Amino acid sequence: MGEARRRKEKQSDWPNSDRFDGDVELHILAPDPSINGARINELTGDEIFSPDARVVLRAYRAVADEREFCVGFCVGDGEGFTPIGLAVIERLSNAKLNAPLHIVPIRHEDIAWDIVIHHLRTFTDEVLLFAFADSDVYDAGIGPVHYSKWIKQFDHEGNFLGRLTQAQRNEIRGQKAAVLDRPPPPKFYPTTGVDHEDAPWIFRIGTPAGKFLRTAFWNGRRNYAHELPPEALNWVGGDRIAVVQVDSPVGVNRRSSLELTHWLAAEFDGVIHWARDTETFESILRSFIRLDLEADSPPDLPDDYSPEVVILAAIPDQPSE
């Protein structure tokens, strides 16, 4: 079969041929005796725990379809983490030596679980970390792990842990509501000796014209200072890719990244939205998650993949007269 025909037949099977909507298994990583109170004190530079203290870490080996990777959950902002967060990162690093750490910062309770299940189903690398902005966001993101029909939890010996019942969940909510005096926000500490990478955000889009394509997002953080990495092109695939700078949050002047993607689909096979800053990035992300669009993984591409790339610079909003 010719290469052109093979590619065409593969494209005709997509978007459903590589879609995964099944269960995700989370196997708790075995306790690491070297990660104790003394080690956390060493990581933070503060005397926080007694030296022989044992800590419980949210660190797992995840199995999603044919993919396996390590994943952790902690409180942090993506650059700094709580003492327990540093311990989670060390546990993941010990499980996957020299593998880059892909971090997903989560700041909003209402979409925390959507973000978690999205990445659990689509992540294709080796180490993933969810960093929740505070304890409320953490609870919103980690809670469904214990009762979602899409998650199966096992201890480090392979025993299925079961799921929380509705009565147990109600009891936990009642206990949380009874806590009135909350401690101050935790102090975050920077990590050292760990390579950080942003985890890709990829969605499958179907246009009104019946065309399917992948679209991805990239956070420019501060005035596009966080440059788009070359490997981002591999997230969407296709012969022609549009990289679109987004200068301000969606919804301003009725701006819609989904409508822009539909419009660009007439000429491009993949679209990457490069947000100017974190606020803009999160506005795009929230709009796509609330539309319940399908998550996707990067396509399989040949080693010599070299698409045509068109960068569409943002046109700043003009002040009204």
Image (cartoon, helix red, strand yellow):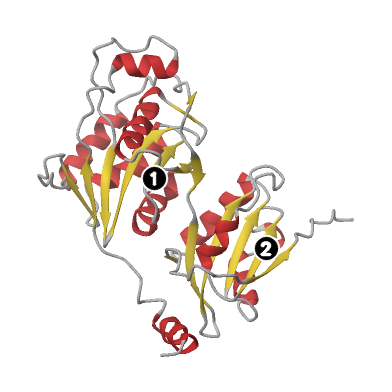
Instruction: Tell me which label, 2 or 1, sits earlier in the chain.
Output: 1
Which amino acid, mark 1?
Leu
Separation of marks 2 and 1 at Cα, in angstroms: 27 Å
Which residue occupies 43% across, 17% down?
44
**Contact between labelled residues 1 and 2, with CB atoms less than 8 Å apart:** no
Which residue occupies 38% across, 29% down?
85
Position of 117 with respect to 31 (left or right) is right
Across the whole image, how many numbered discs are drawn on residues?
A: 2
**Mark sitting on residue 182:** none
Q: Secondary structure at mark 1?
A: strand
Residue in the foreground of this view, choosing between 16 and 207: 16
Residue corresponding to mark 1: 128
User: Above or below — where is 66 with respect to 209?
Assistant: above
Q: Please provide percent x and percent y for residue 167.
A: 16, 43
Which residue occupies 37% across, 19% down?
181
Position of 292 with respect to 271 (left or right) is left
Q: Residues within 10 Å of mark 2 (few under 14, many from 20)?
A: many
Q: Please provide percent x and percent y for residue 134.
A: 44, 32
Which amino acid, mark 2?
Val
**Mark sitting on residue 244:** 2
Which residue occupies 41% across, 76% down?
15
Q: Residues within 10 Å of mark 1 (few under 14, many from 20)?
A: many
